[in-house]
Amino acid sequence: MAEDETMTNLSAESSKNRVGGVPTAKGTSGGSRAAKTVAASSLTYASVKSGVPAKTVKGYVDQGRLRRSDVLMVIPTRTFERRLSEGQTLKIDEADAIARLVRVRDHARRAFEDDDVAEEWLSLPNPELGGEIPIKMARTDIGARDVEAVLTRFEHGVYG
């Protein structure tokens, strides 16, 4: 099957079962990493306070728990690259933002039980969030809370 045809089929499949912009079918085909990546985050208050190594964040990217674009939304590229190359830890506000993004991504994977559906949901404007893109909202604490509230309502079958 050609790549364009595959993408069309995936897009059609993931968009046909929606209520209020939220996919309604759990466990659809796709990412099998969901069970592995939703384990409790190793980022705790203590680790954020003491300093999260930049290499830990790179590990999250390598594992697929975060996207590089997530990291670069909250830490400038040159700063992140310097922290990596010099073996530095993140500042508390940077580590807090990374912990928040990991938490939101893990919550989406847990809610949808499918990495691909979670990724799509996080990356597209959502009517339940005023047309905002969920992962971009997660740059702030209040935005992340709103995203998590919608995910929780979805988990409990409350739409709209």
Image (cartoon, rainbow, N blue to C red):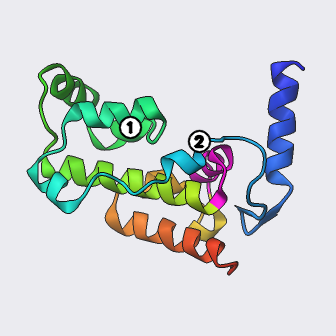
Q: CA distance from mark 2 to mark 1?
A: 13 Å
Residue 123 included in the magenta stretch of the image: yes
Would residue 132 be seen by someone viewing this image from the given angle?
no
* Residue that appears at 88% across and 26% down: 5
The residue that mark 1 highlights is 60
Q: Could you tell whether 89 is left or right of 71 in the image?
A: left
How many residues crowd around disc 1 within 10 Å: few (fewer than 14), some, or many (20 or more)? some
For residue 17, side relative to residue 73 (left or right): right
Q: How many marks?
A: 2
Residue 82 location, x and y as percent? 17, 23
* Type of the residue with mark 1: Tyr
Whether residue 15 is visible to the viewer of this picture, yes or no, is yes
Disc 1 is placed on an element classified as: helix
Quadrant where the N terminus is found in the figure: top right
Q: Quadrant of the C terminus?
A: bottom right
Q: Write the residue at 85% across / 34% down.
A: 8
From which residue to which does the magenta span run?
A: 112-125
Image side of residue 1 versus residue 70, left or right: right
Above or below, comparing residue 83 to residue 2 in the picture = below
Is 90 on the left or on the right of 123, as rendered? Answer: left
Q: Nearer the viewer, residue 139 or 130?
A: 139
Q: Which residue is mark 2?
A: 33
Of labels 2 and 1, the one closer to you: 2
